[in-house]
Image (cartoon, rainbow, N blue to C red):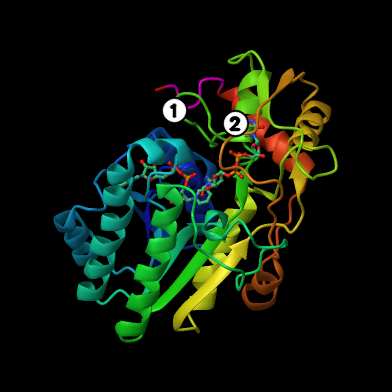
Amino acid sequence: MKILVTGGAGYIGSHTCVELLNRGMEVVVIDNLVNSSAKSLERVRQITGKSLEFYQKDVRDRAALDEIFDKHDINCVIHFAGLKAVGESVTMPLEYYDNNLYSTVILAEAMRDHGVKNIVFSSSATVYSADNTVPLKESSKTGMCTNPYGWTKYMNEQILRDSAKAIDDWSVVLLRYFNPIGAHSSGLIGEDPRGVPNNLMPYISQVAVGRRDHLNVFGNDYDTHDGTGVRDYIHVVDLARGHVAAIEYMQTHRGESVFNLGTGTGYSVLDMVHAFERVTGKKVPYEIVARRPGDIGTVYASPDKSAELLGWKAQYGLDEMCRDTWAWQSKNPMGYGE
Ligand code: NAD
Ligand code: WQD
């Protein structure tokens, strides 16, 4: 089976390529490297001992997609490509809508015209409204997003849902990721944010490796066990395996489906700091500062539907997430070094 992976050079994409290749699937990647390095794909080849095809192209480039679909008999597309920085999306909304929506429309049109019928889309827990109760279920309320990035996920879900209704025999799986962290246990691939990390775990690991002085903890007055924000962190390898499960599910299910990819367990910011220190033996100095605008106290998934229908469950715990984050960060202090 041949899979087209858009955004396959990125953090989650590269880990998913490893899992697909390990399952004996063939992989074709399209990525314009706007937020990644081709070195990640070299490392994927090194980890798996297998080859993959790489097109350094923009997903909005219809001619490039035509070339790929003409040349390769693609069974399924996994659509990771997109811009993902929440704060940047507030200052550059048009770039986010252009990149994240247009890429999906062009990709879906090309799939329809070439008779490719299966697509897995990277959605996000950010599509859930802030006024839900936890755990978040796939049936929980969506919308009222607090930033353009979140709206692009919400709108992309709708675009693909409508397409699944209209195009004969289409199958769309929307995967709502919670907080992916960690890395492949080899330490060869991992998350390599450009500039100052927006997310907690890369910030912690950059403090531990000496690239940053201390962590700012955004608020300690939430209604949580220690006052700091609680999230559902999930090992990126577990997340990657969720995509393999989705592809298998699509072989027998048509139409639209939506699944959470989370563990069902929430940890606070300070839980994460303490676990990281315990597992790695590294100190992570921190200061409590004001809440980050737009943040909410507690977010975690109900993983029940994914367990029941995909037969998928996260296997790794917090210690493995910290261990593998550190394997990557300590072996690659400057990431892929570009
Ligand atoms: P990433 O930035 O590492 O990967 C995205 C990849 O897409 C990058 O390699 C980038 O170069 C590529 N890309 C972007 N626009 C492109 C375009 N127009 N054409 C071709 N390539 C393009 O991000 P990630 O963390 O691996 O996230 C992958 C997907 O998962 C994204 O859609 C993201 O929004 C979604 N997601 C991520 C998280 C998270 O916390 N990391 C959570 C929920 C959802
Ligand atoms: C986690 C916790 C922060 C950084 C974001 C996006 C979401 C999704 C995942 C893509 C919160 C606290 C963080 C720091 C801190 N991405 N924190 N100091 O906010 O759950 O979600 O990434 O879809 O759309 O919004 O993740 O890692 O940014 O924050 O105290 O330097 O860590 O306040 O409680 P979040 P995060």
Q: From this viewpoint, which residue is outermost toward the bottom?
A: 168
Residue at figure coordinates x 33%, y 44% from the top left: 93
Q: Quadrant of ligand 2?
A: top right
Residue at figure coordinates x 30%, y 83% from the top left: 166
Q: Left of 318 or right of it: where is 165? A: left
Q: Left of 96 or right of it: where is 48? A: right
Percent of width and height locating residue 172: 43, 73
Quadrant containing the C terminus in the rendered view: top left
Q: Which residue is under mark 1? A: 194
- Amino acid residing under circle 1: Arg
Disc assigned to residue 292: none
Label tally: 2
Percent of width and height locating residue 72: 26, 64
Tell me whether the residue at label 1 lies in contact with that at label 2, contact meaning CB atoms closer than 8 angstroms.
no
- Amino acid residing under circle 2: Pro
Image quadrant assignment for residue 33: top left
Residue at figure coordinates x 40%, y 43% from the top left: 9
Above or below, 103 against 311 in this view is above
Can residue 328 be seen in this snapshot? yes
Q: Which residues are magenta?
A: 333-337
What secondary structure is the magenta-colored segment mainly? Answer: loop
